Image: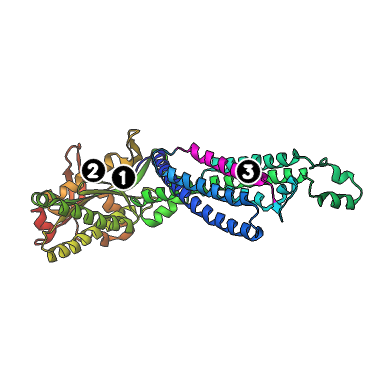
Amino acid sequence: MSNQSDRNLGTEERLKAVFQREQSRGIEVATWARLIALGAIFAWVAVLDQNGENAAGYLGIAIVACNGLALWALHRTRLFRPWQLFASVAFDHFAISMVMISPITIGGEALSPAMNTRTVWYNVYFLMIASSVMVQRPALVVWSGLTAALSWSAVVVHAMRQPGTFTMPLDWIWASTDASDFVRVMQNPRYVDLSNWLTQVLFLILSALTLAAAVRRSKTLLVSQAATECERANLARYFSPDMVERLAASDSPLSRPNTRVVSVLFADLTGFTRLCENAPAGEIIDLLRQFRIRMEKAVFTHGGTVDKYIGDCVMATFGLLAPSGRDPAAALACAHDMQVAVEEWNRERAMRGLPSVGLGIGVHYGAVVAGDIGSDQRLEFTVIGDTVNVASRLMHLTRELEAGIVISDEVAGAALVTDGEKALAGYRRVEEMPLRGRDGAIALWYRPLIPGSDDASCAA
């Protein structure tokens, strides 16, 4: 299995590409959402301005809509740059502020500039901030809030500088002892409320910061969830589903190299080289795919771990994560299920007119070193040691002994303890058998091939 940090790095790179695509789609979604919202505002303004005396509002809506369409068209070209998003947001707020400083006319009479600070146009800033959320850029949301606050402040300052308008000190409300004075000032059409202005600026900035935090939080959760699912997917390639759940719910037990006692199983297709001589490439790939599907099922059924595939050979371990006294018996039961699975597979192949395949299996039980092996470019979690080498040699002995399964004396002894003599039914014992590349001889057990069986024909 690949190293976790390498996998997370790859996940982050893929997520970055996904975010970039979604940000691009967000511009499109935001554009159409704004067009719909601006259409609704246009209709509402038309209802309020039945005499059509305030053309600035309609013009402002059209300018903001065109700005959004221009950004949408630009982001579909190679000329698009991220800074253009920020420029577009600033232009939107500038356009809104231009509408708000335009004189308001009712019945042919222009209202006091102070009344511009009390119109519904202030609420459009929130619409602009909300639309920036769809692009999934926290910085853009904050920028939208800041430019909205500056634009609104410019509108208020412009009203304050006009002849005839007036303001009151911020503490005048508490200094006044007469409520009627407060009401009279508030109802004055020339009054610009500084406390209300500061409150509105505060709410614009707080709203933007809250939404930006929500965007950042959602992205963080998405990255975390994607990394978790990626980790689960990688684990599912090697472990049974219940073991994946156990690993996902605990700290990584695979993070440090250590010595463990496990059962190691090697299973190899016999006759594979002969089958590949004239078979089409697609048929060979399908053969290996079907082989691996059946081997994985047997391994996972008995709580094993798929360590690796080596061409037409599979290596599995039992007891790597949760060792128990039944690990050798589980490996032996897995070997039997593998043989049964290949027999059923051969019957399916015969019905399709395809040649049969054989399977040679070797199983050993002992200490191994488990950990990440390889370079920074390619790390793999695996087990190594004499136990692995012996299991591989036992698998190769199946041809010499004309056996389907060859197991070490350690596996046989442990299986007898847990499952009794039935575990070794049909096996024969060899007191001493030398192994290629290893000093000395070992005792082993093997189950002979049945004459006339598919395995026997493939081994011949």
Which residue is identified by label 1?
366
Quadrant for the N terminus, please: top left
Which comes before the other along the chain, label 1 or label 2? 1
Which residue is identified by label 3?
98
Looking at the image, the residue that sits furthest to the top is: 375
Q: What residue type is labelled 3?
A: Met
- Residue at 40%, 40% (x, y): give it: 13
- Between 21 and 99, the one lying in front of the other is 99
Give the distance between the C-alpha atoms of the residues marked 3 and 2, in whole angstroms: 83 Å
Q: Determine if residue 405 is in view.
A: no
Mark 2 crowd level (few <14, some 14–19, many ≥20, 10 Å Cα): many
Q: Is 40 placed above or below 89 here?
A: below
Which residue is identified by label 2?
390
Q: Quadrant of residue 355?
A: bottom left
Give the distance between the C-alpha atoms of the residues marked 1 and 2, in whole angstroms: 10 Å
Which comes before the other along the chain, label 3 or label 2? 3
- Residue at 10%, 63% (x, y): give it: 353
Q: What stretch is highlighted in magenta?
A: 81-104
